[in-house]
Amino acid sequence: MLQLIFYPALIILLFAGAKIMKKGEWNEDVLSFEHTKAFLGFASIVIIFHHASQKTCADWLDPHYIRHGLDLFVYAGYLYVAAFLFCSGYGMRTASRKEGFFKGYFRKRMLPIIIPTILIWLVFFITERARGVKVAPPLWINVYDYIWFIPAILYMYVWFYLSFHVMKNEKLRMPLLWTGVILYIIFCFFFSPGTWWYNTVHLFAVGAGFAGNSERRLQRLKSRYPLKVILFILLTLIFFVAGNYYPMLTFILHKQYNGMIHRLLEGPCQMISAYTFVISLILLGLKIHIGNRLIKTLGTFTLELYLLHPYFVQLFAFAFINVGNRPVFYIKDPFLYVLAIIIPSIPLAYFEKKLITHFKKIE
């Protein structure tokens, strides 16, 4: 069980060089660009563990392929994606106050997302064709199932543009943004493959709303601080368990499993836990200032790392893309499997980021 070493390693990664505020002191930089980017650098690594765990120890896998050790990551990924979406919404509204923010908006905001997405899509597509994997339409979903985040964030960027540039009435801006979020959630509830398509998108609007008056909101969080820390962490645990382990709970309580009730509970409970998790992070961040050099660096190319690492998740898994497909190079040991994902993903994602930045400067 050498993979258990990853748990203390992640704790060290997050808290190395951290500063704990003294009594009466607060980390006023908790929502600063530098501080949030540092946490998102850490979050990007946790998401790698999340995807690796779903190929090694998820309860829906054939028992023949299950290798335990990464079990705590199986359902945890969406919580960290929620942090990404909150910071995106917060950062967008904060930056939108600057003059000229919306000039060339779609080119500046969307092309840096679309270009690396197309590149990794092509890598997946070429590999699948070379392996003889049959791909049914629509191609982009079947070739790269982790790509749901891309249409989600692009959709949010479009609604942000409509809400904070096209809409001139300031009082209607946040209601309009929330309208876009709700429409997206409703659509995904009926037509998406699962809750991961929509269980965190509301955090984009929450982040934008928080940026509307962040000083006042942070001041509220400081009031009765210990109680709020305990409350939000407890709520996160309760709704996380309710939203992800409902079948197990019904077994423990000797109740008959009801698929429809689960479907109606799963999404809302996950959405609530995503919200309370992010608030918990802000609360803890008010007292703990993180930001060592490694997570700061990771925070500069999170999108590229998010897009690229699933290729290695699939490349070294028991099946390539879909169950039933032949593996490319199956690594059974979870410890070696994670290393085989992380070691090539980080430098390649960093190089891709540098390359895209270089071409943007030339432009």
Image (cartoon, rainbow, N blue to C red):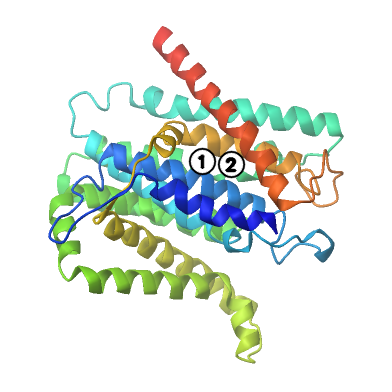
Asked if the residues shown at circle 2 and circle 1 are in contact, with their CB atoms under 8 angstroms apart, the answer is: yes
Label 2 amino acid?
Ile
Q: Please give left or right for residue 219 compared with residue 329 in the image.
A: left
In the picture, the disc for residue 147 is 2
Nearest to the observer: residue 256 or residue 328: 328
Quadrant for residue 146, please give it: top right
Quadrant for residue 192, please give it: bottom right
Q: How many marks?
A: 2
Q: Residue 328 location in percent, x, y? A: 83, 38
In the picture, the disc for residue 349 is none
Q: In this rendering, does residue 19 appear at all? A: yes
Q: Which residue appears at 33% of the width and 62% of the height?
A: 280
Name the residue tied to disc 1: 151
Please state which of the two labelled residues, at mark 2 or mark 1, is closer to the viewer: 2
Q: In this rendering, does residue 162 appear at all? A: no
Q: Please give left or right for residue 328 compared with residue 355 in the image.
A: right
Mark 1 neighbour density, 10 Å: few (under 14) some (14–19) many (20 or more): few
Q: Residue 12 location in percent, x, y? A: 46, 50
Q: Is residue 159 above or below residue 265?
A: above
Q: Please give left or right for residue 333 compared with residue 287 in the image.
A: right
Nearest to the observer: residue 304 or residue 16: 16
Q: Residue 151 location in percent, x, y? A: 51, 41
Nearest to the observer: residue 232 or residue 239: 232
Q: Quadrant of the N terminus?
A: bottom right
Q: Which residue appears at 16% of the width and 44% of the height?
A: 169
Q: Residue furthest top?
A: 362
Q: Secondary structure at mark 2?
A: helix
Q: Is residue 171 above or below residue 160?
A: below
